[in-house]
Image: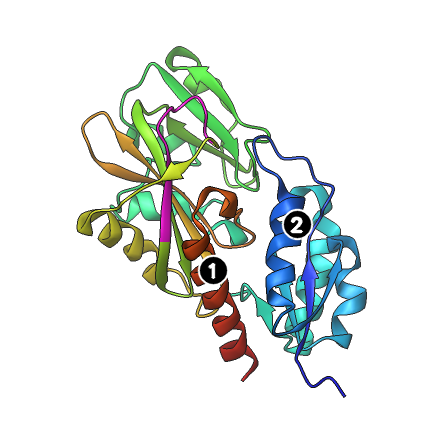
Amino acid sequence: MDRRHALLYVTDLGYRARGRRYGDEDVHLSARLREEFRVALCHPADAAALMDGFDAVVVRNSGPVLHHRAAWEAFRARALERGARVFNQLTGRGDMAGKRYLVDLTAAGEPVIPTVDRREHLDRLPEAAEYVVKPELGADSIGMGTVPARRLGELALGPDAGLLVQPRVDFRYEVSFYFVDRDFRYALYAPDPARRWELVPYEPTAADLAFARRFVEWNTIDHGIQRVDACRTAEGELLLVELEDLNPYLSLDRVDAATGDAFTAAVAASLRALLS
């Protein structure tokens, strides 16, 4: 009898993401995990119905939740009701819970792109020629747009509007820091701001890692993968863009074999700990 733990690996292999190949990454990662676990892949729409037959559920490149909101809510409710082991754990308070955490972190004085969600708080934003408007439950730049400063007051904002406003920041590049549990594994950056997903390896400084770790430590996930996305401003400061703690794309095709192997080993170790 095969006594390996059984994992339900949730992914949408057919989802088309700009600049990324979700399916390729999950075929690779699930194959590596299969060396230690029994692994079955399923679409997010089927996760709630299938999860009871597995020891743990791994939520990976399943696409933006907004494309299958009802299925995600059904899965989440069932997982919490059954006390299912889910990787990432469902306790995250980053993108997993929507992007309102950016408002809260702004109010707390943390180094994030300044973000507000109410008309009466617009004066808390720095002056800019343009402002970015994005949905609180958005992902993958879906629903995001810009407005000139003169039209900022026309926005329909408020607790029920579900919109966030940020100044359009002049930045030098974007950089992502990848963690398994609370351990840093690698970093990648996009030298050209116009090509977000043309990533190359990045060697973080001690200050860079301290910046990224503060958000991983702030979050409430003991077992899972987190990607801290930041931008380097023209003045050299790092600002948080988002804390992706639900199904972060890993860009494993952009790291060397040794880094990729170490990352996969760390994921397997985290899953063992989750299942223990």
**Image point (51%, 44%), residue name:** 253
User: Could you tell whether 234 is left or right of 177 in the image?
Assistant: left
**Image point (71%, 62%), residue name:** 75
**Image point (29%, 39%), residue name:** 239
The N terminus lies in which quarter of the figure? Answer: bottom right
Dot 2 or dot 1: first in sequence order is: 2
* Label 1 Cα neighbours within 10 Å, binned few <14 / some 14-19 / many ≥20: some
Question: Relative to residue 53, is residue 218 depicted above or below?
Answer: above
* Quadrant of the image occupied by residue 222: bottom left
**Image point (40%, 58%), residue name:** 179
Percent across and percent down for residue 65 are 65, 47
User: Could you tell whether 239 is left or right of 74 in the image?
Assistant: left
Give the residue at mark 2: 62
Percent across and percent down for residue 98 are 52, 48
Mark 2 element type: loop
Give the residue at mark 1: 261
Q: Which residues are magenta?
A: 186-196
User: Could you tell whether 229 is left or right of 47 in the image?
Assistant: left
Closest to the observer, 253 or 146: 253
Question: Relative to residue 127, is residue 239 depicted above or below?
Answer: below
Q: Nearer the viewer, mark 2 or mark 1?
A: 1
Percent across and percent down for residue 113 are 33, 36
Residue type, label 2: Ser
